[in-house]
Amino acid sequence: MLRYIAQRLAAAAVTIWVATVAVTLLIHAVPGDPVRIMYAKFQSTPEQLEAVRTSLGLDQPIHVQYAMYLGRLVEGDLGRTIVGDQPVLDVLLARFPATLTLAVASLAIAILVGMPLGFLAAYKRGTWVDIGAMLVAIVGVSMPHFWLGLLLLFFFALQLGWLPVAGSGIANLVLPALTLGLANAAVLARLTRSAMIDIFDQDFVRTAQAKGLPKTVVLYRHALRAGLVPIVSMLGLQFAYLMGGAIVVENVFAWNGVGRLAIEAVFARDYPLIQGFILFFASIVVIVSVIIDVLYAFLDPRIRYG
Amino acid sequence: MASAAEPVHAAAGTPASRSFLGALLRTPSGAVGLVVVAVLVLAAVLAGVIAPYDPLRMAAGPRLAPPSWAHWFGTDDFGRDVFSRIVYGARLTLQIGVIAVGISLTSGLLLGLVAGYASGWTERVLMRLVDVLFSFTEIVIALACLAILGIGLTNAMIAIGIASIPFYARITHSVVLVERNKPYFEAAVAGGAGHLRLIFRHLLPNVVPTLIVVGTLGVSTAVLAAAGLSFLGLGAQPPQPEWGFMLSSSRDLISRAPWMMIFPGVAIAITVLGFNLLGDGVREVLDPRQRQR
Amino acid sequence: MSKSLLEVRDLDVVFGAGRHRQHAVEGLSYTLGKGETLAIVGESGSGKSVSSLALLGLLPRAARIERGTAHFDGEDLLALPEEPLRRLRGDRLTMIFQEPMTSLNPVLTIGRQLTEGLVEHRGMSEAAAEARAGEMIELVGLGDPARRLAQYPHELSGGMRQRVMIAMAMASEPDILIADEPTTALDVTVQAQILDLMRDLKARFKTSIILITHDMGVVAEMADRVVVMHRGRKVEEGSVGEIFARPRQAYTRDLLAAVPRLGAYAGTAAPRTVVDSPAEVDRRAPVLRARGLRKRFGGRSWFGRGDAGVLALDDVALELHPGETLALVGESGSGKSTAGRAVLRLLDVDAGEIEVDGIAIRELGRAGLRRARRQMQMIFQDPFASLNPRLTVGALVAEPMLIHGIARGRELADRIEGLFHRVGLESDHIRRYPHEFSGGQRQRVAIARALGVGPKVIVADEPTSALDVSVQAQVLELLLELQQSLGLAYLFISHDMAVVEEMSHRVAVMQQGRIVETGPRPVVLNDPRHVYTRALLAAVPIADPTRRRGVLPRLDTAAMPRGPLTEIAPGHLVAAGAEAA
């Protein structure tokens, strides 16, 4: 178990390390002069651009740049934004709570709606319940997040006037969380159904039936307990997918999270901020997937005592 | 989507043939999916014939006119015909699907095949890298690509293509691992087969069915992603009739002109649904094991 | 026998509907007496499992009962609603399944899985159920109940898991135990122990057993009465003595004739002769020689402190002459398949020398190895997986000949046709795909493929263990005929001692990566010197109800002598220390 966790942590460290390398290389992959592109909007003299280049370390050989980047990173310094000239980390951290709130609320909705739906469909496999549930799910999977968001906005905020259109309060959370949550619920319902169908076909479920256990015991103690193992293992991926969706949904509802910041940064070609965002986002996804892997290990005795 | 990651164990030796189409039409999802995709292709090819107006022509009608006989889907804030824009948008959508999936499928296939066949250190390093990229998530890779390449629809297609390479590489790799551990592969080795024969005659034909399924489903993902990027303003630029972009310009007019929001969204959803259903149908045909479910 | 406990009448089970409607069981009737063991035997697709699953209401989704009654204790099981049937199931009627590895829930403790039935049906308290479960753990010979009950299934071996299944099924002292191929997935020595255990518990609890099996040896060991099934119908029914001594139906007679019987060829030194003037073994020079083979799997971890891995091959030496069959026998995990792959260099060993036809295989480069593969071919166990599903069988048979540049064009086509006829297939089979063939036919295709390049050595890895006995007999016959007319050398890997006796000149017994005894087949099989060889032979169920063997002692594999080999008679080598044991 400890060894398993150590392996996961090592893998996570490798991922984050590769992210730092990728982020350093990113700016060099830009065709043309990144500094000129970044400052295209400002009226800058060649001397000013040269000064920026020196301050970003772009006049140094690449390995020196990387060493500098790592050195500042351990001190928690991700550089300064081009627009507004603020510390990148501060900007990200200021926006992060909003994104986290949205992600957690959406994940809760996705799990509470998607898993029971998938479970029910698998249990009623081949019946109208299954077909209906999967029809809803595939339509849900096929709807763009932002369109679902706009539809919800149209009906609940504009037609019915129940909820505010945009902003950052609790009432404002409902629509974006619902949008992101329902879209992910559809994905999760499909995954849960297929995982549970695999479980229902397992020999040990037949054994439980052969023991004459009541249907509910077979279902919950035997099938569901075992089914949780593969389902939880998919949650890491699901979370990453959800975080990706958050970037779009934040923009629909003007939710002031990291995702909105990222899009602004791409527009503004604010490379330090883009670099910081990528590193930050990848780290969050990796850390969450480590947590989920550990959770998974607790559910599966084959790993817990492995 | 992860549900596509299960390898398709090809129906024992179904040689590509006429019967494939017949079998596909007999599955409900395959039939519906095929019809949707066919309509999309027709719309793209015959856009000039079908669309009543030039999609870029301003003031083809009054501004923000609701749906009517003259303008089936209404007009937008520049007085352009929404229906014509949606029909022409099919061209862009198909382009997105083909280019993005083309990039990710070929690169992913190559990577996964090489890693899975080579085994040993090559495999470990390649797949470790793929795993790392995979955990960056597709949207972040796409954003990074756009930050490098600059915004625009073509760059968005390329970015989406690059972003999904890790996904295709992982799937190819996992299928190759399954196949190369089957006795028929060992039998081919024992028969004296060389690298090329093993890869192209034995592995590839058994990997392709899975990738056809994944690629079909992948078109949906690519279309969704491109629409998303265009919605954010990172993809299509004015005045391109791209569906996601049309949605983004509808945002501030939702209450005054809901048709500007409804029809492009329906177009995206139906297209994506069509490819999802087609993918499910193809999977069913290629993998009879699934049919019993 | 006493009065009947269960009476099945006119049972019809159907799969599918409409055009796809198919009878799995048709008009099956039988009775089961109190304390009786009834064996239902048949080959795959005979409906033997389905008919029993129907009794407990456990049929797969696609199947349904169309007709029939099954009276048990005054009630018709087939007409019973789900709830009362559930109360009988797992209490008075219990079942164990073929696959012990997958039949237990991986996320629940053994204790939980053992007690839940007792709590449910007998209304026991958790503590009482646990005490009972502990008793059962002792009774099935697992020992240390406290520890066992806290364990999870993955911590136990297949044989131990089947003991748990039996403990579970017997804890309520049921009236009827249905055992569906309970030992098929197990090694022969473990099978013997499980059969002993079932007999013992049956006597103790006076349980009736319905034993579903394809193995006539197991039938002869266990059954009082036998029902023979074929394609969903009952072919014949009778006491075990009658069925074996005087089978009335042709199908039963063929089935019995096809069963390889250990001891049938005890008097001859050579395999069964099937051609008029068989090729003799050429003793001048070996065609295959391997020495000091060693291979370790796993054991290297990224964190450096991993386990030592598994030593799959440990100082293994083999010698095979033209026209000769060396049988490599052993149980799962003994390393016999690894050895077979190693001599073809399908996997690389860590140490050792391998010579095929005088060429040192391990020193060859890629091109040399490919050339050398012409001399050595392989036939695999699973004919369903060993043929590429995307190629026609004609293309598959052609492939090695093309690779080695043996023939092309018209000549190649002629050769392929000739090979198809040689192995008993027809010309119009050539253009078909593997899935259009039965298991036996596919194995013929695999043999034709191997023969095409004119090899000197063929490694056959359990070539018939996935086949029904009647098909097995035909494939073995073909292999014998080819050897005796072409002078082929076979390295024949098998776990089935009776098949080994029929097929081989010499035998090497492998256990945990080492050869513990080797020598001429009659000597090793008739006068085994190593404890393990003896145990292996004693554990083979004998397809003769008049010769039931007694209870076998349990093997302590850890304490067995493991070598080095010493020669105790010309050509007969045994692991040192074995004589004393």
Image (cartoon, coloured by chain):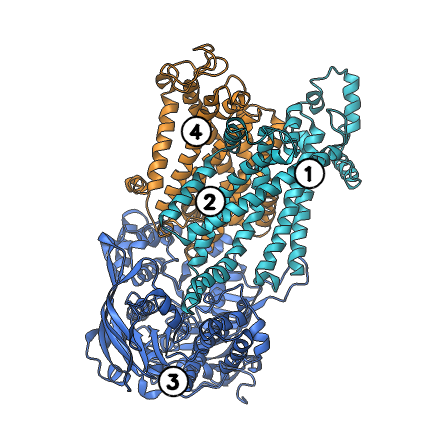
Under mark 4, the amino acid is: Val
The secondary structure type at the circle numbered 1 is: helix
Marks 3 and 2 sit apart, C-alpha to C-alpha, by 52 Å
Chain in cyan in the render: A
Residue at the spot of label 4: B266
**Which mark is on residue B4?**
2
Quadrant in which residue C178 is drawn? bottom left
Q: Are marks 3 and 2 on the same chain?
A: no
Q: Are marks 2 and 1 on the same chain?
A: no
Residue sitting at the far bottom: C580
Under mark 3, the amino acid is: Lys
Task: Give the letter of the chain under mark 2.
Answer: B
Q: Picture coordinates of residue C356 (x, y %)?
A: 46, 65
Give the side of residue A222 with respect to residue A29, left or right.
Answer: left
The residue drawn where x is 55% and y is 38% is A178
Q: Earlier in the sequence, mark 4 or mark 2?
A: 2
Answer yes or no: is residue B82 visible: yes
Residue at the spot of label 3: C206
Task: Give the letter of the chain under mark 1.
Answer: A
Can you tell which of label 2 and label 1 is closer to the viewer?
A: 1
Can you tell which of label 3 and label 2 is closer to the viewer?
A: 3
The residue drawn where x is 51% and y is 24% is B247
Chain C image colour? blue
The secondary structure type at the circle numbered 2 is: helix
Chain in orange in the render: B
B257 lies above or below C405: above
Quadrant in which residue C523 is drawn? bottom left
Under mark 2, the amino acid is: Ala
C579 lies above or below A52: below
Task: Give the letter of the chain under mark 4.
Answer: B
Q: Are marks 3 and 1 on the same chain?
A: no
**Which mark is on residue A97?**
1
